[in-house]
Amino acid sequence: MKLKSLFASLVILIASSMSLQAAEQQSVTLDVENFTCTMCKYTIKKALKNVEGVESVDVNPDNKTASVVFDPQKTAIEALINATTQAGYPSTVKE
């Protein structure tokens, strides 16, 4: 019986930590300017990945967008926009 109780507690603990981790993530899609060639995708992705707190980046050359998942306690949307702008690709939040 103690083993079942221990297992149930472990499952609850894991589920709680997963929901806390998911709550710490935020996502945004940026419209990116000056997107003219296939290499742009890699430059934009590298600039965004270098921002502390960024967890994933998906750059879509067809739509000229970048979708970013990040930790809002470590960075802000303004830092993401600044990163693409500094790399030569000004961006705005897609509406």
Image: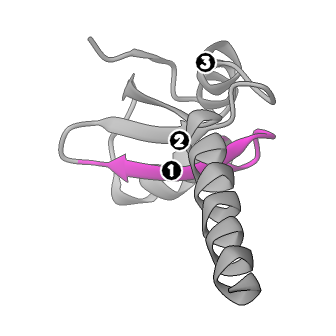
Pinpoint residue 17: horizontal percent, then vertical percent: 69, 53
Pinpoint residue 76: horizontal percent, then vertical percent: 69, 19
Task: Give the Cα distance between marks 1 and 2.
Answer: 7 Å
Q: Residue at x 51, y 50 (%)?
A: 57
Quarter that holds the N terminus: bottom right
- Tell me the kind of residue under disc 3: Ile
Residue 63 appearing in the image: yes
Residue 85 picture quarter: top right
Q: Residue at x 33, y 35 (%)?
A: 65
Quarter that holds the C terminus: top left
Task: Give the Cα distance between marks 1 and 3.
Answer: 13 Å
Whichever of labels 2 and 3 marks the residue nearer the N terminus, that label is 2
Crowding around mark 2 (Cα neighbors within 10 Å: few <14, some 14 to 19, many 20+) is some
Q: Name the outermost residue toward the left.
A: 62
30 relative position to 17: left or right: left
User: Which residue is tagged 2?
Assistant: 69
- Tell me the kind of residue under disc 2: Val
Which residue is at the front of the view, 4 or 20? 4
Magenta range:
48-61
- Tell me the kind of residue under disc 1: Val
Q: Residue at x 76, y 39 (%)?
A: 51
Kindly state the secondary structure of the residue where label 3 is placed. Answer: helix
Queried whether the magenta region covers residue 55, the answer comes back as: yes
User: Which residue is tagged 1?
Assistant: 57
Kindly state the secondary structure of the residue where label 1 is placed. Answer: strand
Q: Are marks 1 and 2 in contact (CB under 8 Å)?
A: yes
Q: Residue at x 29, y 48 (%)?
A: 60
Kindly state the secondary structure of the residue where label 2 is placed. Answer: strand
